[in-house]
Image: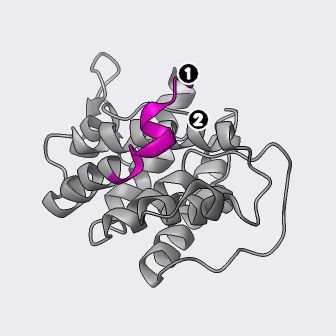
C-alpha cells in the first residue's frame, strides 16, 4: 500500500499525513479517481484532470476513450497514426506524456507499470459513434466483429463511470452520455458479449 500511496502522492491524489499517526488525506482529484475502475484508471483520471477531454464532441470522446481501454493482442510500435481531429490528437499526446510520467513513477516505486495507451481502436470507435456500419469501421484493421463489440462495451463502461463523477465538467459529462448513446446501437446494443 505504501508504494501505491507514494505514486498517488506524486500525482496529488493524496496529501501525506502531517505526522506518523495521521492518515493521508484524499484530494478532490483523488475523490474523482475513486469513481473510475479499470486497468488504466489512474491514467484516465490524469488525462481527465488536464481538461483535454472537456471540449470534445461525443464522437471524439468515444474514439479517444478507446485508447485508454483497448489493448492490441500484438505489440505494434509503429509511428502514431493520424488522429480523427485536432482535439483527439491533443488528448492522445497528453495521454502518452502522462503515461510516460506515470510509468516512471510506478517503476521508481517498484510497482507494475500501467499499460500504455493504444491508438488501435480510436478510428473504428470514432467511425462507429458517427454512425458508420460495422464493415466500414473494421476496414483496414485486424479486429473481428466480436472483438470490436467487446471493446465497445468496455468503452461504454468507462464513459458511464466518468459521466457519474459528481463534479465532472458539465460539457464532458454531456459528451460522455451522448457518446454512450452513439456507441450503444446496432450489434453493440443487441449482442450478448460478456466482458
Question: Is residue 122 rendered to the left or right of residue 186?
Answer: right
- Which residue corresponds to the image point at 58% horizontal and 35% vertical from the top-left? 150
Q: How many marks?
A: 2
Q: Is residue 99 above or below residue 97?
A: above
Q: Secondary structure at mark 2?
A: helix
Q: Is residue 100 above or below residue 105?
A: below
Question: Is residue 118 rendered to the left or right of residue 29?
Answer: right
Residue 38 image position (x, y, % from top left)? 50, 32
Q: Can I make out residue 22 in this image?
A: yes
Question: Is residue 105 rendered to the left or right of residue 64?
Answer: right
Residue bearing the label numbered 2: 150
Badge 1 local density, few (<14 within 10 Å), some, or many (20+)? few
Q: Are marks 2 and 1 in contact (CB under 8 Å)?
A: no
Quarter of the view holding residue 172? bottom left
Quarter of the view holding residue 195? top right
Q: Earlier in the sequence, mark 2 or mark 1?
A: 2
- Which residue corresponds to the image point at 47% horizontal and 54% vertical from the top-left? 65
Does the magenta-highlighted stretch encompass residue 54?
no
- Which residue corresponds to the image point at 86% horizontal and 47% vertical from the top-left? 74
- Which residue corresponds to the image point at 85% horizontal and 52% vertical from the top-left? 75
Does the magenta-highlighted stretch encompass residue 188?
yes
- The numbered disc on residue 194 is 1
In this view of the protein, which residue sits in the foreground, 78 or 46?
78
Badge 2 local density, few (<14 within 10 Å), some, or many (20+)? some
Residue 129 image position (x, y, % from top left)? 42, 60
Amino acid at each position: 500500500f505504501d508504494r501505491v500511496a507514494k505514486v498517488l502522492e506524486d500525482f496529488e491524489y493524496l496529501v501525506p499525513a502531517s505526522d506518523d499517526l495521521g492518515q493521508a488525506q484524499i484530494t478532490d482529484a483523488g475523490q474523482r479517481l475513486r469513481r473510475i475502475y479499470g486497468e488504466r484508471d489512474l491514467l484516465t483520471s490524469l488525462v481527465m484532470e488536464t481538461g483535454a477531454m472537456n471540449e470534445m464532441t461525443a464522437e471524439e470522446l468515444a474514439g479517444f476513450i478507446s485508447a485508454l481501454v483497448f489493448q492490441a493482442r500484438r505489440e505494434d510500435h509503429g509511428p502514431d497514426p493520424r488522429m480523427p481531429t485536432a482535439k483527439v490528437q491533443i488528448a492522445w499526446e497528453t495521454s502518452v506524456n502522462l503515461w510516460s510520467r506515470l510509468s516512471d513513477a510506478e517503476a521508481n516505486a517498484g510497482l507494475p507499470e500501467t499499460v500504455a495507451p493504444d491508438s488501435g481502436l480510436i478510428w473504428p470507435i470514432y467511425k462507429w459513434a458517427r454512425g458508420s456500419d460495422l464493415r466500414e469501421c473494421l476496414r483496414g484493421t485486424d479486429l473481428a466483429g466480436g472483438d470490436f463489440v467487446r471493446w465497445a462495451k468496455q468503452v461504454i463502461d468507462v464513459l458511464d463511470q466518468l459521466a457519474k463523477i459528481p463534479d465532472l465538467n458539465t460539457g464532458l459529462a454531456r459528451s460522455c452520455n451522448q457518446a454512450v448513446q452513439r456507441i450503444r446501437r446496432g450489434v453493440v446494443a443487441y449482442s450478448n458479449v460478456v466482458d
